[in-house]
Image (spheres, grey):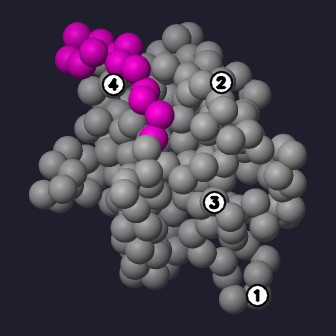
Amino acid sequence: MKIQLYLSGEVRTHFSISTQEIQSDAKTPLFSDWRSLWRCDHLISTDDGLEHLFLFTNAVTQYNLIMVDRDKDFQSLLGSFQQHFALTLHEHGQDFSEQSIDTECQLLSGEPWGLSKRMQFTADQAIECLLANDANIDITEEWINGYESLTYPISASDAMRLRITPDSFESDAEILPFKIAR
């Protein structure tokens, strides 16, 4: 499995990623594996600018991972993300032997409107939780992934578990391209 990753403008600017390194989602087929498609956005930075938090959200389950950048090294951030994602899959019921997360990551541009809007809401919640919990990333991840609302009546963590458990949920559902709401 390879990762396809939408990058927000802030992320591209922070890591000085050129437009030549990013492919348009309008011209790129999206993978059918639900684990493949993510979006990354800048969450918050420390006042001294030495640490930056980035929010990664899965397009299908809305599951969130928060990663720290201290060196403005995008490849290190991706490596940390992939390790954290593999551990998360294991924690939600997938054996390590069944995981095949490739180190290759395809960077995408475009505006997955629904996902972007959901991430704005989640980012606001995450910042509040980080400030209330002495910047504890683990507590914040657990809280935002356990959150349910009328709009999203299932938590991101439960959605992840349903995707991993094949007898509970159809796991080969196709990911459809995002359309901009007009």
Q: CA distance from mark 1 to mark 2?
A: 35 Å
> Tag 4 or tag 2, which sits nearer the N-term?
2
Give the residue type at disc 4.
Arg
> Tag 4 or tag 1, which sits nearer the N-term?
1
Q: Residue at coordinates 56% horizontally, 27% vertically from top-left?
A: 30
Q: Which mark is residue 48?
A: 1
User: x and y percent of residue 56 in the render?
Assistant: 55, 51
Magenta residue check for 93: no
Foreground tag (1 vs 4)? 4
Foreground tag (2 vs 3)? 3
Q: Residue at coordinates 54% horizontally, 35% vertically from top-left?
A: 37
Foreground tag (2 vs 4)? 2
Q: Would you name the residue on which mark 3 appears?
A: 8
Q: Which mark is residue 163?
A: 4
User: x and y percent of residue 59 in the render?
Assistant: 45, 41
| Relative depth, front residue between 154 and 71 | 154
Q: Would you name the residue on which mark 2 appears?
A: 2
Give the magenta part as a residue range: 166-178
| Relative depth, front residue between 38 and 79 | 38
Q: CA distance from mark 2 to mark 4?
A: 17 Å
Q: Residue at coordinates 52% horizontally, 11% vertically from top-left?
A: 98
Q: CA distance from mark 3 to mark 4?
A: 26 Å
